[in-house]
Image (cartoon, grey):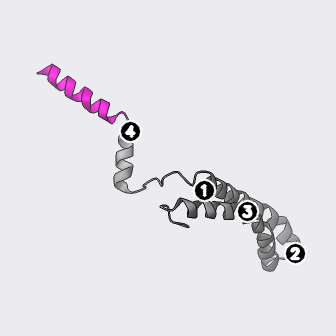
Amino acid sequence: GKYSEKNPAEKFAYGVGEASVSWANIPLAVGRFSEEYDPLTGTLVGIPVGTAVAVKECLEGTVDATFFFAPHIDDSTAAKKKRAKGFLYPLRELDRKFMKQKKE
């Protein structure tokens, strides 16, 4: 990732930084498209593209800065399987055992 998930201060600082400089993507996109094509096309295409990237990065930064204290969600296969069982899994197991005893 972009920062250590175990360090909330780093996540907060990254989020604040990301949100505060996201606006810079607009002139960057205009410059990139102006160099590749011409200044008019660079402006007409660069502003919407840069704005979209800036909004995305601003939202990402805001979420990181707001929820810096939230623990990282484990995306490993084992964790996904465990979450897939859901919070009702223990109840289903209990019901399955009860039904098995009832049949006997």
Name the amino acid, label 3. Answer: Ser
Q: Secondary structure at mark 2?
A: helix
What's the CA distance linking mark 2 and mark 3? 27 Å
* Label ID, residue 16: none
- Whichever of labels 2 and 1 marks the residue nearer the N terminus, that label is 2
What's the CA distance linking mark 4 and mark 2? 54 Å
The residue beneath circle 2 is 39
Q: Secondary structure at mark 1?
A: helix
- Whichever of labels 1 and 3 marks the residue nearer the N terminus, that label is 3
Query: What range of the chain is rendered magenta?
Result: 88-104
Image position of 86 (left or right of 65):
left
The residue beneath circle 3 is 20
Name the residue: 57% across, 64% down.
10
Does 25 sit above or below residue 95? Answer: below
* Label ID, residue 64: 1
Q: Secondary structure at mark 3?
A: helix
